[in-house]
């Protein structure tokens, strides 16, 4: 079940959960807690496997390789579920080595992958029932990352681009789940500015320096030199949030806030950056002119490394779950917009009513288009000011032409 490839919001199907997405729009997904899929706008949803025993664990992972998908699958030789690598071009499914444990028919589960696909991390079980963070390298050799608390579990949730930094959790003696960061195999427990131990770490930037997760009521962003909590006006004991994914540069974070306890898809999604703070994901998409079709983009689970695609689970009008893929590239990809070659600039940005243009030396003409490329305003510049009060809220490109030279500038109308 998919919309056309030109749409900006694609519906993946009832009961589908998008769990990972790359820059090309390849989505890793699951369904009904037993099946793994991949999805593209061109080919739609393709099933990879269905478990023979028990239920799904981990995530369906993709990288920039565009031909490999990492899944949780039943190995028929051991009759346990483990990590497998699926090749799209051949349909081949290869089971990765693990430590031969068996906990509820699971020996290993996949949780994170580097952008190039060379490093995979997750959870492995051992014959003595221990559960540890584990990792696979480019040759798919598996390594036990161990635990720093005797008789307690650890798990690796994400890995940076070169495989040197891994994040996840380490259980304390008390059983509390602590944020863990491994650098070249050495584990550190993360804390906030006051020394309080953070909750589970879920993802890490490409350079390994930005870590996100959830801490009590709030999603958090940790770096070696700073700590930020993402708040919500309704935050409290019964309304909590978590950060789920971030861009490769660590500048954009997605996540959710929802009633607690409650169904995961009965809350609201958010997108965050340092300049704009937390924004409701539906409101953000609609401000760009994207029709969200009545669906609540409640549980965004992955954002592509370049920040142009988001996937997760939405709440349908009847309360059911609907997988979604949100394509923001028409707004965020400015590669086709010429960079300014002179000192023409615009302000304020965002703007409410009057947009000022500085740097003009002669008469100029402006043309304003929306993110769909539709022309919404054309006029001669008077007093270096353009009235945009009548434009609807959203993102636009203003093209300023002076002496035959055109420069383009993106702005947001509030």
Image (cartoon, grey):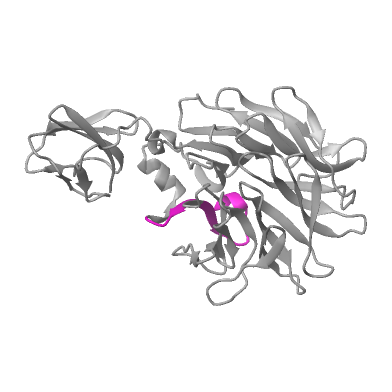
Can residue 58 be seen in the rendering of this structure?
A: no
Q: Position of residue 338 (x, y in %)?
A: 30, 32
Q: Is residue 373 above or below residue 228?
A: above
The part of the chain drawn in magenta is 254-275
* Residue located at (59% from left, 71% from top): 191
Q: Position of residue 33 (x, y in %)?
A: 73, 42
Q: Position of residue 61 (x, y in %)?
A: 67, 40
Q: Identify the image quadrant of the N terminus.
A: top right
* Residue located at (42% from left, 53% from top): 279
140 left or right, relative to 277: right
Taking depth in this image into account, of 412 and 360 the one nearest to the observer is 360
Is 70 contained in the magenta span?
no
* Residue located at (75% from left, 74% from top): 174
Q: Position of residue 150 (x, y in %)?
A: 83, 70
- Quadrant location of residue 42? top right
Q: Is residue 178 above or below residue 265?
A: below
């Amino acid at each position: 079940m998919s919309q056309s490839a030109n749409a900006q919001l694609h519906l993946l199907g009832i009961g589908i959960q998008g769990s990972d997405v790359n820059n090309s729009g390849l989505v890793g997904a699951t369904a009904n807690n037993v099946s793994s899929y991949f999805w593209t706008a061109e080919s739609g949803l393709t099933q990879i496997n269905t478990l023979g025993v028990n239920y799904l664990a981990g995530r369906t992972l993709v990288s920039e390789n565009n031909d490999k998908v990492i899944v949780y699958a039943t190995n028929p030789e051991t009759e346990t579920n483990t990590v497998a690598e699926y090749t799209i071009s051949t349909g081949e499914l290869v089971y990765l080595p693990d430590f031969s444990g068996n906990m509820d028919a699971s020996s290993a589960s996949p949780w994170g992958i580097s952008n190039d696909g060379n490093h995979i991390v997750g959870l492995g079980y051992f014959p003595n029932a221990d559960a540890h963070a584990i990792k696979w390298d480019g040759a798919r050799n598996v390594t036990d990352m161990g635990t720093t608390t005797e008789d307690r579990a650890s798990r690796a949730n994400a890995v940076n681009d070169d495989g040197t930094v891994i994040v996840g959790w380490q259980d304390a003696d008390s059983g509390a789940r602590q944020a863990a960061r491994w650098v070249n195999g050495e584990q550190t427990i993360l804390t906030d500015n006051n020394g309080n131990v953070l909750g589970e770490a879920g993802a890490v930037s490409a350079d390994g320096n930005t870590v996100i997760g959830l801490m009590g009521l709030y999603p958090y962003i940790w770096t070696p030199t700073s700590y930020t909590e993402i708040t919500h006006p309704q935050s409290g004991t019964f309304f909590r949030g978590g950060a789920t994914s971030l861009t490769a540069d660590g500048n954009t974070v997605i996540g959710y806030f929802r009633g607690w306890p409650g169904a995961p898809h009965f809350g609201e999604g958010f997108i965050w950056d340092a300049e704009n703070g937390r924004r409701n994901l539906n409101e953000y998409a609609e401000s760009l002119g994207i029709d969200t079709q009545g669906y609540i983009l409640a549980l965004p689970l992955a954002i592509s490394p370049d920040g142009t695609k988001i996937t997760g689970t939405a709440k349908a009008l009847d309360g059911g779950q609907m997988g979604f893929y949100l394509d923001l590239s028409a707004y965020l990809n400015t590669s086709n917009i010429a960079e300014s070659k002179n000192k023409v600039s615009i302000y304020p940005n965002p703007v409410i009513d009057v947009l000022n243009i500085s740097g003009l030396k002669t008469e100029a003409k402006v043309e304003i288009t929306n993110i769909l490329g539709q022309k919404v305003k054309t006029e001669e510049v008077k007093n270096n000011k353009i009235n945009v009060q009548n434009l609807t809220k959203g993102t636009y490109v203003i093209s300023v032409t002076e002496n035959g030279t055109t420069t383009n500038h993106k702005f947001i109308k509030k």
